[in-house]
């Protein structure tokens, strides 16, 4: 019996779609998300064909996925498979946009952990670091706290990235810590940047790396896996040892940004320092801080205006 277009399985179509349109066109990290979505489709609807796919079936897929995932993760899954389904609709292989008006559900997220430290707690953490004569993960914690680098960006740092005369650090690559190691491009064009460093950090790193090969990573090793969870565990223990809230390496990036914003640094400058594609990303990420600063501004405005009477 000849297989017709309407007999094509949704999971098979999605797998082929990913191979044709996504492999070689997106970053490996993003491609792995498509492969994960592909595996979930095979698990949830192994026998559902495109001709059977309607709004009810699609909603049932999302509902089943949401049982084990939080709402944002379900939303991401929805966006990953929606592109393929809309192409199938355009090709006449599925009903008129079954993803229309989809309801996104999900597990209740756990209580939010503290994402960043205040200035006093960060000072306490940095004072406790073991900064000897050779590179270690405490130096890694220090450079992330002082620059707001992403985890993969900090792993990719080499001695050549430091310009001690100009007190800058060049960010132009990342480290493939989720794969086999090696350098990768930055997250986006805006992530390629130069970050100004304070003189204490300059002195520490000028001594630390002066005898190291200029083109080799300071922290990562070729052929040796580095796990985010390992470094987070080290940071967690450092925080607990000095009695401050435990945060992650990504939390150090948030800490860096929040301290700058509270110090009065403009959103544009913070966005450029973090390598955000636009100020909108910075505003969304640090909305709670911006709102708090706006409340302080209102108090200043009111005091200024009342003084004019």
Image (tube, rainbow, N blue to C red):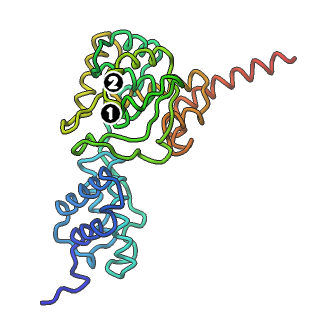
- Number of numbered markers: 2
- 63 to the left or right of 252: left
Q: Position of residue 42 (x, y in %)?
A: 18, 63
Q: Which residue is mark 2?
A: 140
Q: Which residue is mark 1?
A: 155
Q: Which sits in the foreground, 270 or 170? A: 170
Residue at the image position 20 percent from the left and 65 percent from the top: 45
Helix or strand or loop: what does disc 1 sit on?
Answer: helix
Q: Position of residue 179 (x, y in %)?
A: 23, 45
- Please, is residue 153 above or below residue 137 in the view? below
- 201 to the left or right of 225: right
Seen as rendered, the residue at the extreme bottom is 1
Label 1–label 2 contact, CB within 8 A? yes
Q: Position of residue 84 (x, y in %)?
A: 34, 68
Residue at the image position 67 percent from the left and 25 percent from the top: 297
Q: Position of residue 238 (x, y in %)?
A: 29, 16
Residue 59: image tag: none
Residue at the image position 24 percent from the left and 42 percent from the top: 181
């Amino acid at each position: 019996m000849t297989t017709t277009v309407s007999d094509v399985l949704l999971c098979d179509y999605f797998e082929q779609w990913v191979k044709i349109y996504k492999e070689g066109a997106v970053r490996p990290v993003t491609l792995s998300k498509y492969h994960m979505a592909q595996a979930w489709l095979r698990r949830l609807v192994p026998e559902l064909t495109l001709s059977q796919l309607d709004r009810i079936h699609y909603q049932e897929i999302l509902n089943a996925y949401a049982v084990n995932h939080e709402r944002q993760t379900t939303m991401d899954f929805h966006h990953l498979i929606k592109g393929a389904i809309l192409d199938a609709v355009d090709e006449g292989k599925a009903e008129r946009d079954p993803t229309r008006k989809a309801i996104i559900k999900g597990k209740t997220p756990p209580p939010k952990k503290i994402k960043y430290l205040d200035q006093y707690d960060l000072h306490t953490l940095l004072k406790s670091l073991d900064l000897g004569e050779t590179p270690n993960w405490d130096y890694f914690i220090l450079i992330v706290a002082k620059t707001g680098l992403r985890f993969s960006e900090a792993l990719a740092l080499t001695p050549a990235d430091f310009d001690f005369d100009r007190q800058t650090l060049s960010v132009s690559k990342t480290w493939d810590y989720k794969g086999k190691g090696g350098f990768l491009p930055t997250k986006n064009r805006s992530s390629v940047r130069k970050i100004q460093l304070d003189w204490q950090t300059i002195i520490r790193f000028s001594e630390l790396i002066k005898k190291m090969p200029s083109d080799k990573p300071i922290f990562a090793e070729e052929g040796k896996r580095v796990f985010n969870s390992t470094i987070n565990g080290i940071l967690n223990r450092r925080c607990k040892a000095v009695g401050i809230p435990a945060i992650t390496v990504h939390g150090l990036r948030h800490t860096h940004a929040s301290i700058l914003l509270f110090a009065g640094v403009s959103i544009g400058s913070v966005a450029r320092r973090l390598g955000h594609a636009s100020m909108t990303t910075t505003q969304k990420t640090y909305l709670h801080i911006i709102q708090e600063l706006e409340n302080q501004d209102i108090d200043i405005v009111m005091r200024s205006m009342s003084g004019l009477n």
